[in-house]
Image (tube, rainbow, N blue to C red):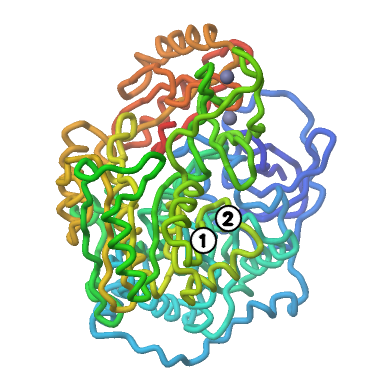
Amino acid sequence: MKVPILLPNIFNHPFTYESDLNLKVGEYVVVPFGKSKITGVVWDEFEIKNNRKFKVKNVLKKLDVTPLKKTTIKFLNWFSIYNMIPKGMALKLVLLSSNAIESFQKDAYKNFEFDIKKNSIKLSYEQKKSLKKMNFSNQKFRVHVLQGTTGSGKTIVYFEALKDIINKGFQGLILLPEIGLTGQFKKKFLEFFGFTPAVWHSGISKKNKEIIWSGIANGEIKVIIGARSSLFLPFKKLGLIIVDEEHDQSYKQDEGVTYNARDMAISRASFENIPINLITAVPSVETYENIKKKKYSISRLEQRFQNASLPNYEVINLNETKLEKQSWLSKKIIDKVNSHLNKNDQVLFFLNRRGFSPHVLCKKCFNSYSCPNCSINLVYHKNKNILLCHYCGFKTSLKRECIKDGDCEYIFSGPGVERISEEVKMKFPQKKIEIFSSDTMNKKDSISKLEKIINNEVQILVGTQLISKGFHFPSLNCIVVVDIDLSSQGHDLRAAEKNLQLYHQLSGRAGRTGKPATVYFQTYNTNTKMISDLTNSNPDIFLDKELDIRRKNKLPPFQRFISIILTGDNEAALEKEAFKFKTFIEDKVIGKILGPVSAPIFRLKKMYRIRLLIRGPKTLKLQNSLAIIIPNYKFQPGIKLSVDVDPINFN
Ligand SMILES: [Zn+2]
Ligand SMILES: [Zn+2]
């Protein structure tokens, strides 16, 4: 018989093979492809109108793996259309390095043995009420939002919901935005369930991945805690998906195959017809709109643990105090911090900028240090004594021959966390200080560093936004936002939302154990209304306003955006091509084309970048119209096109 086999490659259709194995949809097979052998899956339909004449080859063998479910195949077909990704690339997300893993001996899974033990954790009245609402109509697809202030015990509520599902014989998936979180999270999980969950992210070993992949396919493993990519595991009997921190924009995969894991989790739940829970302190604008429309149900937790109150806010107007030269901390803030330190409070200085200085120039020739591959300044990292491009990884040393004479001499303009940490060291020489950024916390010793912070052996932290991600530091009761910068909202439609989330998450780190806590904002910005909006304890007010703005301006979630980026190494040719391409698609696409304009980072990794933004209705018609036109356009050699549906970052 003839069978359609989808292969994990760039093709958007299955290939036809011959086999007498009586194959069924979803089964994994090995087939010859070109000169190699490749793993594929029996797909649910043949390629339409295949007129090519070639000999149909035979399937080599069938693999002993639980077949991919038909509902999962339907999800992948939809995923490919929605995100404008070839079907083969969608399948590639499911397979493990383009392979399917056959089952191991039973004891390979013993580390993940599922054995729920009794715990002594008791739910509060509010938590119980919330759980009841969450478990309502738990047998089929529905989206429920659990909204609760940071520290209100949301995790325990959805753990209970998950326990229920596992006890019924289903598998569960918990998506987390940051892998840095999984350490503290795993501990919490173990305390509650009494067994270790399988953790899935790009950093785990190949062997572990094989065991987990096969254990999910054969049903031996019950729970996955994972990053974005875990959404594509071949679950045998998935019964519940939980998206923790659903508002977190790192759910968006920006490079390669682009998709939003939160949104795709919702659609996978819909195809599998299972419930999904979105967990957040402040919902994303998209989710908020769906709550308002009553598409999603919601329950709320308003009390914090041990009745801790949310931190107070205080704005420190930098126009009223004079900062010393090469200093970023006002006298007023030093006094405030001292009084916190005297009470044994831990203090965090927050600045969302890695390294020492974001802009280095020569005081003789005034030339900046910028990246040779990207149109962006190099950041000076003093600890490593290098200048670094945060986009392409280009590195260079400070030494440069000056066009005037001798070597360049440097001016360091503006601070990063390293520089603030130097100033903090000078002002508080007796205290133990630690920098908390991806440069310092993604290393082997980061677990012991975390322990020290939790035990208050570190009195002062200087951190980037990494610290806003769900860490629990019991003594942290004072946060200083070194420079709240609300001005850079030019090209990013989500800037206001991003700020709301960042400062809400950040202040949620403080005052978690009942002591009074304060967040101080140093700013030159006299628009303090903006700050009070951001810090309002009722974020709905902000979200309502934001929805109004989005509605009026025809922005997501009311319309769909698709971003098309053209890249090429010849600036003039690229520009010409972008206009030609626009004219070509203009009257065929169901939507309005904005641009072409140079991307904010015009040059990245040696390539120039021009962006077209297409705005249209929220139906697949928009994607379909583009999918028909784009292949008919022949790009000049060297010009590449990439598509991003529902873009989040507009770099
Ligand atoms: Zn670069
Ligand atoms: Zn110079």
Q: Quadrant of the N terminus?
A: top right
The foreground one among 301 and 641 is 301
In the picture, the disc for residue 434 is 1
Q: Quadrant of residue 505?
A: bottom left
The foreground one among 278 and 522 is 522
Q: Secondary structure at mark 1?
A: strand
Q: Is residue 365 visible?
A: yes
The foreground one among 247 and 395 is 395
Q: Is residue 188 above or below residue 39?
A: below
Residue at 28 percent across and 49 percent down: it is 522
What distance separates the C-alpha of mark 2 from that of mark 1?
A: 9 Å
Residue 587, horizontal then vertical, whole percent: 35, 14
Residue 246, horizontal then vertical, whole percent: 38, 57
Residue for badge 2: 440
Whether disc 1's CB lies below 8 Å from ligand 1 is answered no
Residue at 74 percent across and 78 percent down: it is 106
In the picture, the disc for residue 242 is none
Q: Earlier in the sequence, mark 2 or mark 1?
A: 1
- Horizontally, residue 632 falls left or right of residue 553, namely right
The kind of residue on which mark 1 rests is Glu
Q: Is residue 162 above or below residue 92?
A: below
Residue at 24 percent across and 68 percent down: it is 310
- Horizontally, residue 300 falls left or right of residue 8, namely left
Q: Dividing the image into four equal quarters, which quarter contains ligand 2? A: top right
Q: Which mark's residue is nearer the viewer, 2 or 1?
A: 1
Residue 57, horizontal then vertical, whole percent: 80, 38
The kind of residue on which mark 2 rests is Thr
Residue 190, horizontal then vertical, whole percent: 53, 81
Q: Are marks 2 and 1 in contact (CB under 8 Å)?
A: yes
